[in-house]
Image: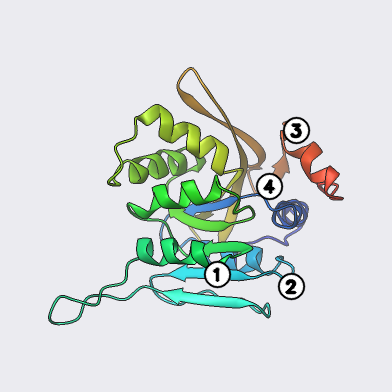
Amino acid sequence: MPALCSPSGSAEALAFLRDCVLGRLNVVVAGASGTGKTTLLNVLSSFISPGERIITIEDAAELRLRQRHVLPLEARPANTEGTGQVTIRDLLRNALRMRPDRLVIGECRGAETLDMLQALNTGHEGSLTTVHSNNAVDALVRIETMALMGDVALPLGAVRTQIAAAIDVVVFVERTKDGARRISEISEVGKVRDGTLEVWPIFARDGEALRRTAHIPAFTDELRARGLELRA
């Protein structure tokens, strides 16, 4: 798993992420292939309360949630006759009818991204997903690009507003030259200003250490109202 519990401040970041999950923030785990995104998604999912109804949506089953009320949904390719395909988008749309407390989407990679944003903006708090990207800012650019691939012709400004309202935190993971996988940045997604999405690093890597920045997240008071002290 990513090096969350090393003495380099990562245990502090893990406590912060635990509070984010318990506080029902929407979290995106971003990174390149092989950086440990799904592994970290499993770690974050383990913080979800055992009594909540969780629906997982994946291309191939990799998540290992241990809560009691987990309903796994898995995509299916078309058969040899070209029929029977079940896409991530199909699963997401059907999952919303099942009254989940949480959605855990293995990876957003296409037009279903707009459906995900709309779901997160209509009461499905505390959801988790992953996306391929090169950094936290690039993750949001990729999400907006995929949302624009959908069959609903929304202007870019509207998509960015939806992203700002839907996603609270981006966690960027990387793989070092020696093969180690680690978190390199935890950022808050801010508002849209002058047409650009704000991204505010909360934790950033300084050499080998993952350090807390001076930024105070806008959701701090909201989580404290829920009895969480954002232990960071």
Choose top left, top right, bottom left or bottom right for residue 216: top right
- Callout in the foreground (4, 1): 1
Local SS, label 3: loop
Q: Which mark is on residue 210?
A: 4
How far is disc 3 from disc 1 in space, using C-alphas? 31 Å
232 sits to left or right of 134: right
Picture coordinates of residue 157, whole percent (x, y)? 41, 27
Q: Is residue 124 visible?
A: yes
Q: CA distance from mark 3 to mark 2?
A: 31 Å
Rendered view: 186 above or below 91: above
Say whether marks 4 and 2 touch (CB < 8 Å).
no
Q: Secondary structure at mark 1?
A: strand
Residue at which label 1 appears: 55
Number of labels in the image equals 4
For badge 3, the amino acid type reads Ile
At mark 2, the secondary structure is: loop
Which comes before the other along the chain, label 4 or label 2?
Answer: 2
Tell which of 174 and 13 is nearer to you: 13
**Residue corresponding to mark 3:** 216
Report crowding for label 4: few under 14, some 14 to 19, many 20 or more residues within 10 A (C-alpha). Answer: many
Q: What amino acid is at disc 2? A: Gly
Q: Which mark is residue 51?
A: 2
Q: Which of the marked residues, 3 or 4, is nearer the chain's N terminus?
A: 4
Cα distance in 3D space between marks 2 and 1: 13 Å
Instruction: Work out whether residue 8 or residue 138 is closer to the camera in this orientation and state it.
Output: 138
